[in-house]
Image (tube, helix red, strand yellow):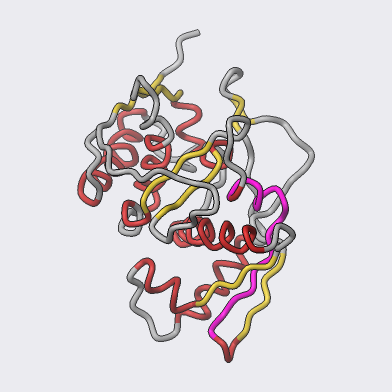
Amino acid sequence: LVREHYHFSSSGDNYLSFKRGQVLKILRALQNRLLNAISNLELNERRLIMFLSPLVRKEVDKNPYQSTFIVRVKDFQDEYGIKSKAYYQELENICNSLQHKTYEFWNFSANKKYKSKVKVTWITKGDYKDNQGEVHIDLHNDVIEMLTVFDKTNPFTKYQRQMIVKLGCYGIILFELISSCLHQKNKTKAYTIEYLREKFNCIDTYPVISEFKRNVLDKAIKDIEKHTPLRI
């Protein structure tokens, strides 16, 4: 059996060191198992999860049992340069969607998703404060852990927030995959085409590999090279 693989290598060293308790707004950090998970999120859903990264760390540092986190609509819009006078409803829609979406982990050795009867949604509850321009979001403990616990047992990836704010959905996915190997001695990593199709949510689209490369991978690379210092 010969499997198709794509190899990515990159260069770029504009990264900051991460210290426990030093929660910087410019940093995004998440465990690699979350980064590698199959999530099938839309662009603004993915943006919200990344937006929660420093927010959750900051609140959990103050209270380890915190599970409710406040997202202010204006802060979210400012983060991604979203121009809208009525974005509250859109953020509510994003949260509603995330309450019905789960994530799955990939078995890289077997080149397929792990089979599990346990499903965890990204958001367990959303409380929408119309007059305050806020959404109070409850997260499952597993999601909180993957946004806050970083050690040798739980390897993680970090990057500066400005790296991803202008990227599209495909660009964000590929950027995070590449970022996970930037601090390795060998900055080259291989992924099977089966995994990449799952990761980019293209199981039933672009069946010809050349089409998948042109419409997904090449577009992601172009997006990354336009908006970040990375060259792939």
Q: Quadrant of residue 183?
A: top left
The magenta-colored residue range is 133-147
- Residue 228 drawn at (x, y percent): 25, 48
Q: Nearer the viewer, residue 32 or 42?
A: 32
- Residue 188 drawn at (x, y percent): 34, 22
- Residue 218 drawn at (x, y percent): 27, 38
Residue pictured at 28% horizontal, 31% vertical: 10
Task: Say whether residue 145 is left or right of residue 166.
Answer: right
Residue pictured at 43% horizontal, 34% vertical: 180
Residue pictured at 68% horizontal, 76% vertical: 127
* Image height of 186 relative to 42, above or below: above
Q: Nearer the viewer, residue 2 or 70?
A: 70
Q: Quadrant of residue 136?
A: bottom right
- Considering every residue shown, the one lying at the far right of the view is 117
Q: Nearer the viewer, residue 90 or 9?
A: 9
Q: Is residue 134 magenta?
A: yes
- Residue 227 drawn at (x, y percent): 24, 51
